Amino acid sequence: MTTTSNSAPDTTGLKPARVGTHMGHDPTTHPMAIAVGLRGRRLAACMVSAAPGAVARPPRGVDRTRLTEIMRAIGDGDDGAVLHLHQEFFAPIAAVVRVELRRHHVHRIDNDDLNGLVLDVCFALSSCARAWNSDGALPWQWARPRVAAVVSSWVGQFAESFDPERHAGGPVTVAEPWTGHEPSMLELLDQLARLHPALALLREALAQVGSVRDQELLIAYVVQQQAGDTSPAVTLGATFDVSPEAVRQAVSRMRRGLRHLAATDDRYELINGLALVS
């Protein structure tokens, strides 16, 4: 776990990482990245959001002992530990992300995007976890170029380079509206699960405890809650053509099943405390 050097990791040829891409693949051409897109980023952020009132993000200081345990677990191949890194060390990682955002003159970001960016950073850190020296700088400081690459990639999604020939008063080309298949949230999660093993564990847990319809309802319910909907059962009842009570019952069944799974199988212990479960 430890190394003899505290120098920053080699980032030669480093590709920006984001939710929806393999580490090292070009995010503009990888077909899965195109399929997942921004909806996938927001869905991934919702899936790993802590439940209201959960004590998962210490406001100050860093527990190095706990951090070392998590990074060692990640380095040893425990994919679920990435979610622990996201939940338990969100605040200090988010602080570094905000600094990098300000370098790009981005001074405001909504909670969903910040949550997704921190998750991206955690996945980026997982790829170099074995090289991190627990006696040196914190992972997000030691691998700062990787954090910068994640943030730069995110900022780049919403910016277009100035082209004098295209932007000097000439006709503007308007993109054709998308008319293809719009994947459901469960299909998006399937795509994300193939890219990130930690999300694959969540996907596997969902499949073990409920029907496809109940899985869809739970995911949609959590997404609606995260978006600020105060009556998600009413909203989804109209969308799925069922009664609000049927939505609430399905969500309750799924959450009971997930809690039981987490309590009886150590592999799924990490899902406790997520908004998806509580």
Image (spheres, rainbow, N blue to C red):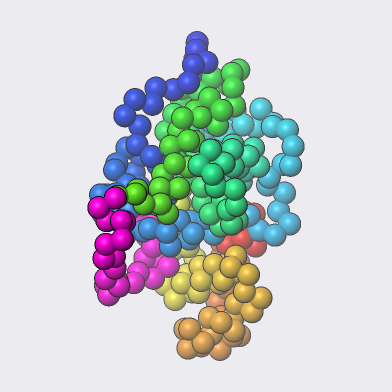
Q: Residue at x 34, y 72 (%)?
A: 182
Q: Residue at x 29, y 41 (%)?
A: 25
The residue at the point 48 percent across, 35 percent down is 148
* Residue at far front of view: 169
Residue 15, given in percent of the width and then of the height, sits at 34, 36
Residue 256 visible somewhere in the drawing: yes
Q: Quadrant of residue 250?
A: bottom right
Q: Is residue 92 left or right of residue 174?
A: right
Residue 173 in magenta? yes
Q: Which residues are magenta?
A: 164-193
Q: Quadrant of the C terminus?
A: bottom right
Q: Position of residue 277 (x, y in %)?
A: 60, 61
Is 45 located above or below residue 60 in the figure? below
Residue 255 appears in the figure? no
Nearer to the camera, 186 or 259: 186
35 drawn magenta: no
**Viewer-nearest residue: 238 or 75:** 238
- Is 244 located above or below residue 229 in the figure? below
